[in-house]
Image: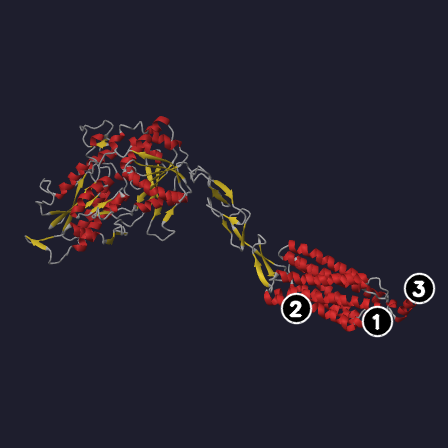
Amino acid sequence: MVSVTRRFSMTVFICHWPVSYTSYCSQVAKNYQHILALVFAINEINKDPSLLPNITLGFRIFEDTNFARMTYQAGLSFLSTGGQMVPNYRCSRQEKLFPIIGSLYPTISMQMASLLGLFKIPQLGYGSFYPFLKERTVFPSFCRIDPSEASQYLGIIRLLLHFHWNWIGIIAPDDDSGENFLQALTPMLDQNNICVAFTKRTLSEISVFYTSIHNDISLAVAVRESKAKVVVVSGDPNAVRNLMRPLLVYRIRTKASLEKVWIVTSQWEFAAVGTSFFWRAVEAFHGALSFRGHTSDVPGFQSFLRTLDPLRPQGDVFLKDWWKLVFRCSFKPTEDIPAILNNCIEKEDIENLPPSLFEMSMTGNSYSVYNAVYLMAYALHAIYPFGSRCAMIRNGKRLLDVQPWQILASLRSTQFNNTAGEEVFFSENYERSAGYDILNLVFFPNQSSAQVKVGRMDPRAPSGKDFTIHTDAIVWATQKLPSSRCVESCSPGYSRKVVEQEPPCCYDCELCPEGTISNHTDAESCVPCSKDQYPNQNKDQCISKSISFLSYQEILGIVLTSLALLLSLITTLILTAVFKHQNTPIVKANNREFTYVLLISLLLCFLSSFLFIGRPTRVTCLLRQIAFTVIFTVAISSILAKTILVVVAFMATKPGNRARELLGRQGVNSIVLAGPLLQVITCTIWLGTSPPFPNLDFHSSAKEIIVECNEGSVVLFYTVLGYMGFLALVSFVVAFLARKLPDSFNEAKFITFSMLVFCSVWVSFMPTYLSTQGKAMVAVEVFSILASGAGLLGCIFLPKCYIIFLRPDLNSRDHLLRNKQNRNTNV
């Protein structure tokens, strides 16, 4: 140790209740590694010539106690000197006290903070603490050096959600820290639909425990009988023992294991209770998941531990007693110790100690103590004018004149990287910004144990990476991942249904309604698929709907296209034949101009069906209905004109009949023009007010998006169809009345039958059209167009073609004259 001009002292409150033999009650520190981490850090700093040159850091250790009077006495003692309890009175000038580290217990931390706050002396607390210690107005000098408990609570929730555990038990101390734990965790559990099967409180005072151990066995019974497989436990080391003793008694009495998954908070220190006396109780925690303040491997710490020598303690008053306790040996055979102890032969290896007794790597609390020492050193470094002439000089030696409040102000802005390479600083709430490691506690039959890091909760990590867990690395007490639920999870395709008078976690599963899915387990509700998708059979995934329209590639489209082409070809051939034999009697008999108009309109009707096949566009939607109705109106009007012409021709043969004069050829021609003109006017109004347009129908079919033509105005659509039907009905009536008129080539009988077919097709079309949807609806309309046109073509022109091609002898002038003479003879 180098020559120094001034010595600064840190005071550490570390409880040293023993883990076993009560005869060593005031001598052996159970949190011994905390002391070693403190000594190691101070040695490093004192050897560092650049951090605090010519300054030596020292420390004083006080036992914290649950008695407020003793705590305050200890606080006043290090605020005074010379054995006098007089605060601010100091005889010594070589030693100056600045920071306080500790205690592990919130009650003592609060008692010390209320005293130290008056003097602005920094206090770095770790372990469990009360939330109101954050109140800066009440405790202005208190800071926390271990991670925030808020991130630990969030880690517990994330852990439960990760394994789908929603039915748990909670055990907490029956003091303010346990109450704070429940108040902080319970709302988070409720928000995430995690239910608490039972809540038990453990005794927080170790002295009270001994009188009630047998009465508190009910705690172990409640844990055993509960269906909850997961138990979340909070508490300080006292609570650890107060829980383990009932578990031990229960294990001895019943010979049964609990087989629970324990989730324990960072305040637990298994090294405090891991002796062989408690092994059967500790073994119950096999497979437990434990949160611990994040630590990193500190270079040189394990080498420092290997140098521990109880024969050369170098001022360590705890080492020898701790050595005897953990190795269960004695340095002097004459000591008054239990007979079961062996002699210490100086060959005991500290590295062979199980982690339940002592760890070679820093624990979370030890790591916090280590960082606390460095925080103070860097805070002092920031305000001390090393090399400056402003420092006080006395007897030729440089002195430091720094007040505690200056250290406190500097401490809050201190930021550095420790020897493990991690950044250390305080957040806005005066808590160290660090996360938690998740450990898996494994206990072996040979009374050895291991603590395996299996996850991390890091609040500073990006969203999605702040929580990590390696499930495959976890050893479970039940050999496999347990399920801790009130009911089995609802599989995808189902949603939860709340059951009255039952906890929210005890729900029923209900199949998703039509059109909705749930793609994860325990869905609160089913969500509908987007309009271009539909649920699969299991209702756990949305599938894109297929586009549906009457295409040329499908069978129905091919059949209708082929039929339309065939009828168009037949019509063309008939038109060619009629034109070639236009001067024959059968063609001239019923006005060949009307015959041409009829055949051409039928040809266009067959071709108009192609407007209905293929994907609808704006142009095809505008043309399809209008084209076919106007063209069919022309065809029906020409048929009506031909029929009226037959009637007029017959009536003109009677003496005194003026029908030919009233109608004449111009009157009959006007029928062919007037009929389509009214239809054109109606269609023009239709296009001008509410024209058809292409539309995507997402709702008519569950699995298809129907590409259709929306007719715009439904009223006008049925108006043009109704008008066409009216003309067809008139033509049918007129032809029916004229079917028996004497004439060699009277078409009225054929027109009557053709109009009967035409009307039958379109009357049956209406209900069929209205009862179908999608491409089936379009196919019905195309088929109706082709069938009605084919009916007109076949009924009217097949007899003519028969005479033209097969009986040309009937299509002659001589045959007509003979028929006329025969009729006159019969009369």
Q: Which mark is residue 826?
A: 3
- The CA span between labels 1 and 3 is 26 Å
Report which residue position mark 1 lands on: 584
Query: Which dot marks residue 681?
Result: 2
Looking at this view, name the residue that lies furthest to the right: 825
As drawn, is 104 to the left or to the right of 576? Answer: left
Q: Depth check: give the residue in front, 200 or 691.
A: 691
The amino acid pointed to by label 2 is Ile
Disc number for residue 383? none
**Residue 69 on image: x %, y %:** 17, 37
The part of the image, by quadrant, that contains residue 289 is top left
Between disc 1 and disc 3, the foreground one is 3
Report, in whole angstroms, how far the alpha carbon at label 2 lies from the one at label 1. Answer: 38 Å
Is residue 681 shown above or below 309? Answer: below
Whole-percent x, y for residue 122 in the image: 19, 48
* Three-letter code for the amino acid on which mark 3 is drawn: Asn
Q: Given contact means CB atoms under 8 Å apart, are the residues at marks 2 and 3 in contact?
A: no
What residue sits 10% from the left and 51% below the top?
5
Residue in the foreground of this view, choosing between 367 and 221: 221
In the rendered structure, which amino acid carries the disc numbered 1? Thr
Q: Secondary structure at mark 2?
A: helix
Mark 2 vs mark 1, foreground winner is 2
Q: Earlier in the sequence, mark 2 or mark 1?
A: 1
Spatial CA span between label 2 and label 3:
51 Å
Mark yes or no: residue 405 visible: yes
Query: Badge 3: how crowded within 10 Å, few (<14), some, or many (20+)?
Result: few
- In the rendered image, residue 670, in percent from the top left (x then y), is placed at 74, 71
